[in-house]
Amino acid sequence: MKKTILTALLIITLNPVPAQQGEIDSLQMLLKNHLKHDTTRIDLLNQISYSLRSVNPQEGLKFSEEAIAISKKLNDAKRLALSLKNKGTNLFMSSAEAEALDSYKKSLEIFEKLKIAGEAGTVMHNMAIVYFGMRKDSAGFDNALKSLKIFEQLNDTLSAAKAYRTLGLKYSGMAEYEKSIEYFKKAFEKFGLLEDDKNQATVLNSIGVNYLYLSDFPRSLENYLKAISIFEKLGDNKNLAMALTNAGIIYEKLGKYEKALEFHHKALHIMEKNSLKENLANSLASIANVYSAMDDRENALKYVERALKVNRESGNEEGIANNLVNIGIIYYDQGKYDRAFQHINEGISIYKETGNRVGMASALSTKANILRQAPAEVLKKYNINPGKRYDEAIMLHEEAISIAGEIEAMEKESEAWKDLSKTFEAKKDFKGALTAFRNHVSLHDSILNDSRTEEITRKEMQFEFEKKEAIAKAEQQSKEAIAHAEIEKQKLRNNTLMGGAALLVLAGGGAFASYKRRRDALEQKDKAMLQAEVADTEMKALRAQMNPHFIFNSLNSITYFLKKSDNKTAENFLVKFAKLMRMILENSEKKEVTIAEDLGALELYMQLESLRMNNKFSYEIKINPEIQTDTFLIPPLILQPFIENSIWHGISGKKGEGKISIQILRENEMIKCIIEDDGVGRKKSSEHKTESPAPEKKSLGMKITKSRIDIINKTKNTSADVRLIDLEQGLRVEVTLPLEMAA
């Protein structure tokens, strides 16, 4: 069984770099020599307190307390607020979150009274991090967004970049990876304006992590390789080691195990050489994963046990859980089911406490595999009835599939479907096994196909080329700089005054040229990013339209009708299905189609779904007389995800028949498309999940549609929008699009 759980998702943290001990010692010496209780002593106390926050926060608290006392004595409100802020930071670093919030709130109140907006924004940002750490997300987002607004208004680029990065990290932790990438890209742009290479590289690494979660390996590797290049240039060994580990993970997932080990061992060597213990466990566990994939269980167990030891010493609960589950998998592969069960169960318990849904999805599926294969005496030891092993295993598989689908972890979902197929087969449920395996193949093919493999190769070649080009360019620039310096030296010797004037002119012209180049580059970058966003969204939209589960279910329906000897229905279904597939493929090449063409495709889709569901629902389409269906244009199948949502989450769970109503109106220079259903509604649908013959991703189609509409607004400067309105019975969706006419 070539399967691994732990993915070393090494997102660079927001913790500030600790101050050098020499710097702290110097400040303390100055403080020792300045005994007067004045503003100078307060400033020194605050500097020392802030410097100690990552080194010794308990000691830092003592200095902030003295600063608070003197500030109160001198009635210095601003310094009191700064001292309270430093106290809050040291309390947070000491894991005293509630006390930290209290101190921050007092600090914020003073800054707001003094109308010092920048400091108020910084305190709000710090409070957001504390709230997120306490899992009080609502308060966290409220403070984070307020602070971001202040930073943007003040044009505080650095603080805004950090705020965007904080939100990116939070959304990543919530498994909202697309949203996380959106905020990280904004942080990347801000750090770029500051020419902050290091922080740009850390953001690239974080973007790579999110693409890895989304199983978009080419983009993930692209970001990691860019980060590696920057960290190598900066000589930043700590972050270089983390980026190398992440790239190694991608190579492992691509089956390039030797390449993966090369990157992982480079990372491990850097960590051991520089005594970087913080991510040593992740590096060891990643190496264990590669050996596990290569069926070298001896080396896999050796490295993962080393990782577990490091994580236990540091008290890293998430790491401990990952290691336990990986050890369980290795024992499962060796047929040591008792020990496997023991480790998997312990890992699952920790995942429940920490809320790690990514690890939980894989662990549950592995536990189900053990249930399927373990001897009866092992199952009885854990109070499991051997006669019900398959039923309990199927429940675990389905829970794993549900979690993976919710967090859009396609790779884990694909593996879970594959494992479920094996369990159905062991139960002699061959129809269930076939359906599960088809779902696995469908997801697997969409994750990694030939075009993606080619793209990976191109990214590698581009990385190597750019690296060599950068070295050559640096050497050339060095030679030119030396030659230029010599020329300038001669000029200065001949005529100091003229040379000085010339240098001033050159500096001014150079600054202007540099500014112009930067401005043009940013404009080109924005344009390229928008084009890439458009292409990516169009591809996702096509994938959503060509939903593999709909295709498989349709083919199964045709087979079902043929088996019943209902040739007429089968033929009717097949004709409609073929026509719909042709229309989707033809329309996917167009940016826009006429309303008539789009409604034709939607009708075919609804007819097929109604036929498959034994006429469970009816539909009607109303078109306002002002709408010229053969002339007005809309993006192809932009309404389809909402109709699919109405069918599977509204009407399928309703007792009796349902109805879908589509209405097309004109409002000034906009087209409004209204979709209404009389199904169970969103609240009831979420409470009682409808059983579906295919895995569901409730939000995927809507996310893609919203992305398409965002792009329409960017490119055409319009106010297209989507609104969801809960009805007393069912749901109403209003999609507003710009009015476009065929030439």
Image: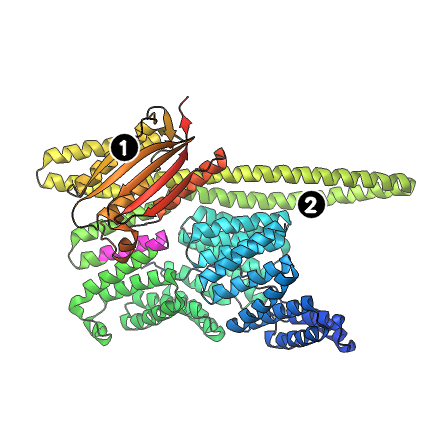
Q: How is the image coloured?
A: rainbow
- Residue drawn at the location 14% of the way across and 36% of the way down: 570
Of the 4 image quadrants, the one containing the N terminus is bottom left
Q: Is residue 408 magenta?
A: yes
Residue 497 spot, x, y in % from top left:
90, 41
Residue that carries the numbered disc 2 in the rendered image = 475
Residue 686 spot, x, y in % from top left:
29, 55
Q: Which callout, 1 or 2, points at the residue further toward the start of the chain?
A: 2
- Residue drawn at the location 27% of the way across and 32% of the way down: 622
- Residue drawn at the location 60% of the way across and 45% of the way down: 468
Residue 231 shows in the view: no
Determine the secondary structure under disc 1. strand
What residue span does the magenta drawing correspond to?
A: 405-422
Q: Is residue 245 magenta?
A: no
| Amino acid on which disc 1 is placed | Lys
Residue 132 shows in the view: yes
Residue that carries the numbered disc 1 in the rendered image = 622
**What numbered label is drawn on residue 73?**
none
Mark 1 and mark 2 residues within 8 Å of each other at the beta carbon: no
Q: CA distance from mark 1 to mark 2?
A: 69 Å
| Amino acid on which disc 2 is placed | Glu
Q: Residue furthest top?
A: 743
**Side of 705 where 431 appears, left or right:** left
Residue 633 spot, x, y in % from top left:
38, 28
Quarter-of-image position of residue 2: bottom left
**Side of 466 where 648 appears, left or right:** left
